[in-house]
Every structure is written in C-alpha cells, then in structure tokens.
Amino acid sequence: MRGATKAAVLKGDPECLNLVTFSVYDTKPVHFLSMPCTNLKWREKERCVFDKGDCCNVIMKFLHTKVNDDYNNCMNNVDIADQLCGTYCFNCWMRERKWWWAIWMWGIQLLLVNAYVLYKTAHLLIWKRQKKDNELV
C-alpha cells in the first residue's frame, strides 16, 4: 500500500441511504462515492512488472480495493466505451470546420466504438461458446 486511506459512511439520511465515500492514494488520488457498496475490503492481486535492476519481469503483489474491482467489472462497459472514444478520437482536426461536423463525427465515432464493444461481446458469448460445444460433440 502506497498511501493513506480514508473512508466514511453517511447514515440516517432518508434521501440517500448508506452513501459510502472512499479515498485512497496510489500513483495518484482515487476517489469513490458509492451507494451499492456494502463494505470496504482489500484484495491482494499480482501484476507482472519490469525490474530495472534484474532486467527481467517479476511478479509484484499489491493491494486493490473491492470497490474498485466492482466498479471496473460491473459497470456494463459504459466507461470502457468512453475511454475508447477518448483514446481513438479522430475528430480533433474538425475544430476549424462548421460546428455540426464535430457532432456528426462524434456520432460516427460512437457508432464505431459501440460496434467494436458489441463485436467483442458477441465473440465471447456466441462464437467461443459454439467452438466449445462443437469440441464436446
């Protein structure tokens, strides 16, 4: 663990039941504000990193919060699609054109990213499963 951890639970507010706020410092501050979070637990994980001293890859163990894992794995690819749109942005050169070109290109870009996410999901759910079913026969 690299830095300090702070956590708080808001109880008793009828408008906002069991609001949990969680902050941890890793390489930069990470903040969570969650209502479905029921507890704050740590998970030990492993990552392969390059060691400059030995000039080889080594396994490093580190602590990761369960809240972070739940967020990354259970948000139905919403943030992954936003991340892909930001990474593969191809309308940067459109700033000097008419304003509606930026909106048009954003729509095309969103269409491509959603098609890619849908393709990956279909590949995992349909084609990989059919391959396994054919091997069993």
Image (cartoon, rainbow, N blue to C red):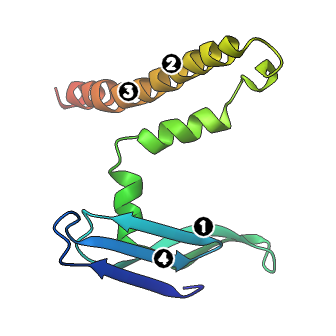
Counting residues from the N terminus, which is met first, the one under dot 3 or under dot 1? 1
Counting residues from the N terminus, which is met first, the one under dot 2 or under dot 3? 2
Q: Nearer the observer, disc 2 or disc 4? A: 4
On screen, residue 52 above or below 95: below
Image quadrant of residue 13?
Answer: bottom left
Tell me whether the residue at label 4 lies in contact with that at label 3, contact meaning CB atoms closer than 8 angstroms.
Answer: no
Q: Amino acid at mark 1?
A: Cys
Residue receiving disc 1: 48
Residue receiving disc 4: 23
What whole-number distance in Å separates the C-alpha atoms at marks 3 and 1? 27 Å
Tell me whether the residue at label 2 lies in contact with that at label 3, contact meaning CB atoms closer than 8 angstroms.
Answer: no
Element carrying mark 4: strand
Residue receiving disc 2: 111
Number of labels in the image equals 4
Tell me whether the residue at label 3 lies in contact with that at label 1, contact meaning CB atoms closer than 8 angstroms.
Answer: no
What whole-number distance in Å separates the C-alpha atoms at marks 1 and 4? 25 Å
The foreground one among 65 and 60 is 65
Q: Amino acid at mark 2?
A: Leu
Is residue 95 found left or right of 125 in the rendered image? right
Residue receiving disc 3: 123
